[in-house]
Each structure stands twice: as structure tokens, then as C-alpha cells.
Image: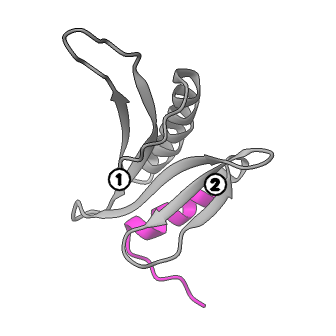
Amino acid sequence: MAITSDVVSQSTAAYYGALLVGLNDGLKKHGIRGLVVRVIRLHLRFDDLGLPGYVPPELEVRGPDNRLRATVTIVTGKSEPAYCVRPAGDAPQFLLPVEEGREALAYLVGTARDWQASR
């Protein structure tokens, strides 16, 4: 997981996490392993306690050999949030509106099972 410096509000992190958990539940139905990773940054010093910072969660999708196949995050566009699917390696990333969760799920199942897309 690549931890970015971007932080979001707690409610936004919870919303993004719920979207990724839903996608992960769909992967489980196909026998695909996924893990939703949540990061909370805490500034802890003896004389200075800061508020927590919430990093947008990520979904790590792994294949049968436990190798990372793709990472999914949520990005916010002009009108609606979208799944940002980044396959492992040099493959291009995809942006799919969260309303098209079935397409994201189908792509992730194929990626985790090492299916080759025909061109």
C-alpha cells in the first residue's frame, strides 16, 4: 500500500471504506481474497496531541498465490465518486463510477484469476 499525504474527514473515510467493503464482499462470493486497509495518522508528542488524520482506505486484491493483483481506491470526480482500479505491474488504471460496481467487480475477478482480456 502506498500511503499518501492526503487526508480526508472521518465521515469521508468511513463512506469510502463502506464502498470498498461492499466491493470486497462481492469478491468473496467469487472466492477472491481482498483486504480493506485503513490508515489513521496520529500525531503523538508528550506536550502536543493532534487530531487524527484519516487516509482514504484501499482495497488490496490478491490472487490464489497470495500475490497482489490490484489495488482499488475511491476518487471523487466532479459529480460522483469512482473506483480507481490499479492493476499490479504496468497495466493502465481504470476509473469506474461506483454505480458501475458490477463492471469493477468483473474486472477484479478476472485480474485475480489471471484471465487475459482479448483485444
Q: Which of 115 and 84 is in front in this view?
A: 84
Please give the name of the residue rendered at 45% of the width and 50% of the height, measured from the top-left corner: 27
Q: Mark 2 points at which residue?
A: 102
The three-letter amino acid code for the residue at tag 1 is: Ala
Residue sitting at the far top = 47
Q: Position of residue 104 (x, y in %)?
A: 59, 58
Q: Mark 1 points at which residue?
A: 2
Please give the name of the residue rendered at 56% of the width and 62% of the height, measured from the top-left corner: 106
The type of colouring in the image is one colour
Q: Which of 88 and 64 is in front in this view?
A: 88
Residue count near mark 1 (Cα–Cα under 10 Å), binned few <14, some 14–19, many ≥20: few
- Which comes sooner in the sequence, label 2 or label 1? 1
Left or right: residue 59 compared with residue 102? left
**The image quarter in which residue 115 lies:** bottom left
Q: Where is residue 69 in the image (x, y as percent from the top left)?
A: 36, 65
Give the quadrant of the C terminus.
bottom right
* Highlighted range, magenta: 103-119
Please give the name of the residue rendered at 51% of the width and 41% of the height, measured from the top-left corner: 20
